[in-house]
Image (cartoon, grey):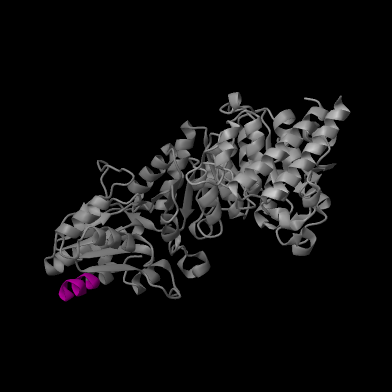
């Protein structure tokens, strides 16, 4: 996931490697279930993939296994939520948000039940397994569905807070993350609020507006750009894709010389186009680049290979920033 | 309520259904007529739910999986007192909550449905929740026979049997017609009895217009550890002879003259029944 130079930069920035967000999700849910018997996890032969083995042992009556049947998983989750359960439907993001999209739209969002849907191993976490196992469309389609909060945490802290928020949510809630170990980006004093982006690093030469597990890549690039080129780059973690923090995006566009958005998602319909919409409608015109997965058959390889190939890396983002500023 | 009284009510409900569909300018006439007796029995005899108890966590739940026959549900809920009958003059009108499929905006509706193959999975979740809470409530859903082509029904069928959900009842409105024609020609689903038995359900086959048979199927105790599947053999367009077993009435809207004719048929049936009762 990280080149030796990126690891060195992380050390220079004082970042500590944490656990996979997936593991933090599982630990948080298990912790919450211990004090809230209404929490139910619904899995589609995915308790292992979702690191919920411990949950299943500790709270066997609070886990519903539906087998490899994702449509049923979402329908069952909706029915449980409609009857007072805090139901978490947990399944790989690729299946959850494609095969059962209609159930998400109708059973959860349209019926307005307070269910949480957890897309595990999302984006290209399952990189080498191929396109069947990638979810690069999920943010686009879920953004277009009414009545759903969409959260993509960047690190262990954001993941824990997102799952806590999901457990308290009175409306449909979607969270997606990957399975690689993440560097910590925030101190415990950081405030997490759904719909409110977090500025990880300040600066005005350029803004990286990133989401999920690409935020660390943007932060490392910001460190690199400062160390090598004396550039002060802002890094914003947009953990909530919907509702979007329009103000943070607007301010970044207004105050910074250029804007680069970064996401583990298709360049169509995700964070980048959402930011473009915010800025254009606000009359803010700055050099702007969307970094994500282009509209092509995704390159083969592990997640790190795919990130590197498409420039979602410290090195790639640094170069993109320099090119963008040069062209301005 | 006695069978004869329910049968009289059913005629009135069918008349109201046709009025609502004509007023709306849209609707599913044939299927609404075929499932009317099932809904009548459910809401007026079987289910423990009323406008007064609709917020009770232990109420019985009903999810209409064949959501397109919402007009039948609307008139039954209205008759049951969930909302005034006058509300139904707005069905499918601009800014009305009474759209062409069930939504929770309508008093008495548990879940939004309309896309087929969604009701049974939802009801599995509801029945599981009841089991977790040791709630005595039962969960009912109504499926169309054309709807059985949706694979999600079979996913839920497996799960319901796997978890031994004997508090769950799925009712099949087995009218054998769908929008294109005979279900057997569109996508064969038979033998439905044997298929659901093979899935581990307790299957009960009844005449879906016979109140005694429907009542028995829906109230006889469940086989412990088995969900119940009621195959209700029905007639699409039931009660209006020129609509019966004619696929075009799947979502055909009666003209003014057809409404007059259909109403006359139902009035005649009503008069005949009343004569019999007297």
Q: In this view, does B154 lie to the left or right of B207?
A: left
Q: Which residue is drawn at 17% across and 66% down?
A: A225
From what the image shows, is residue B166 above or below residue A280? above
Is A28 or A152 nearer to us in this picture?
A: A152
Tell which residue pokes out farthest to the right in this image. Answer: B276
Magenta region, mostly helix, strand or loop?
helix
Q: Residue at x 60, y 33 (%)?
A: B85
Residue B268: where, in percent of width, then height? 81, 38
The image quadrant that residue B225 belongs to is top right
Residue B142: where, in percent of width, then height? 70, 44
The answer to whether any part of residue B155 appears in the image is yes
User: What range of the chain is rendered magenta?
Assistant: A319-328
Quarter containing the N terminus of chain B: top right
Q: In this view, does B261 lie to the left or right of A183?
A: right
Q: Does the magenta run of residues contain B151?
A: no
The answer to whether any part of residue B169 appears in the image is no
Residue A321: where, in percent of width, then height? 21, 70
Q: Which residue is drawn at 52% across and 54% down?
A: A49
Q: Does the magenta run of residues contain A322?
A: yes
Quarter containing the C terminus of chain B: top right
Circle count:
0
Residue B156: where, in percent of width, then height? 67, 49
Q: Which residue is drawn at 45% across and 36% down?
A: A32
């Amino acid at each position: 996931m990280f080149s030796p130079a990126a690891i060195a930069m992380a050390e220079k920035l004082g970042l500590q490697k944490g656990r996979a967000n997936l593991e933090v999700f599982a630990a948080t849910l298990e912790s919450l279930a211990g004090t809230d018997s209404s929490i139910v996890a619904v899995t589609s032969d995915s308790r292992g993939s979702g690191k919920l083995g411990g949950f299943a042992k500790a709270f066997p009556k609070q886990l519903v296994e539906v087998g490899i049947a994702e449509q049923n998983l979402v329908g069952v989750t909706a029915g449980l939520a409609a009857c007072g359960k805090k139901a978490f439907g947990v399944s790989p993001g690729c299946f959850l948000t494609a095969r059962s999209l209609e159930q998400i739209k109708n059973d959860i969002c349209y019926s307005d039940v307070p269910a949480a849907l957890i897309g595990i191993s999302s984006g290209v976490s399952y990189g080498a397994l191929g396109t069947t196992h990638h979810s690069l469309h999920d943010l686009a389609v879920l953004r277009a569905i009414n009545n759903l909060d969409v959260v993509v945490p960047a690190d262990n802290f954001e993941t824990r807070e997102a799952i806590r928020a999901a457990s308290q949510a009175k409306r449909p809630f979607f969270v997606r993350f990957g399975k690689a170990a993440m560097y910590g980006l925030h101190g415990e004093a950081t405030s997490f609020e759904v719909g409110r982006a977090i500025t990880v690093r300040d600066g005005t030469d350029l803004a990286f507006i990133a989401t999920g597990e690409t935020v660390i890549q943007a932060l490392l690039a910001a460190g690199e750009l400062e160390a090598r080129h004396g550039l002060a780059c802002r890094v914003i973690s947009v953990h909530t894709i919907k509702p979007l923090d329009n103000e943070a995006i607007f301010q970044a566009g207004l105050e910074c010389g250029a804007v680069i958005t970064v996401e583990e998602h298709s360049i169509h319909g995700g964070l980048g186009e959402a930011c473009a919409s915010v800025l254009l409608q606000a009359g803010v015109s700055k050099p702007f680049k969307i970094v994500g997965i282009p509209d092509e058959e995704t390159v083969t390889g592990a997640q790190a290979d795919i990130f590197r190939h498409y420039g979602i890396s410290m090195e790639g983002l640094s170069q993109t920033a320099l090119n963008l500023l040069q062209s301005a | 309520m006695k069978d004869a009284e329910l049968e009289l009510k059913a005629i009135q409900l069918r008349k109201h259904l046709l009025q609502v569909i004509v007023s709306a300018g849209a609707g599913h006439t044939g299927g609404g007529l075929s499932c009317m007796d099932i809904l009548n029995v459910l809401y007026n005899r079987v289910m423990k739910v009323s406008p007064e108890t609709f917020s009770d966590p232990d109420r019985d739940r009903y999810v209409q999986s064949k959501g397109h026959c919402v007009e039948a549900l609307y008139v039954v809920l209205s008759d049951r007192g969930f909302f005034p009958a006058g509300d139904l003059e707005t069905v499918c009108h601009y800014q009305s909550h009474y759209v062409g499929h069930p939504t929770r905006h309508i008093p008495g509706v548990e879940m939004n449905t309309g896309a087929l193959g969604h009701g049974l999975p939802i009801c599995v979740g509801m029945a599981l929740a009841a089991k977790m809470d040791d709630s005595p409530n039962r969960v009912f859903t109504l499926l169309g026979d054309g709807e059985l082509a949706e694979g999600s029904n079979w996913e839920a069928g497996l799960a319901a049997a796997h978890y031994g959900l004997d508090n769950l009842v799925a009712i099949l409105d087995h009218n054998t017609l769908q929008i294109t024609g005979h279900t057997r020609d569109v996508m064969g689903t038979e033998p439905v009895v044997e298929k659901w038995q093979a899935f581990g359900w307790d299957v009960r086959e009844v005449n879906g217009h016979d109140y005694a048979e429907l009542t028995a199927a829906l109230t006889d105790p469940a086989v412990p550890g088995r969900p119940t599947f009621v195959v209700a053999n029905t007639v699409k367009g039931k009660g209006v002879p020129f609509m019966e077993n004619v696929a075009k009435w799947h979502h055909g809207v009666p003209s003014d003259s057809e409404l007059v004719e259909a109403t006359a048929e139902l009035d005649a049936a009503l008069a005949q029944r009343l004569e019999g009762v007297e």
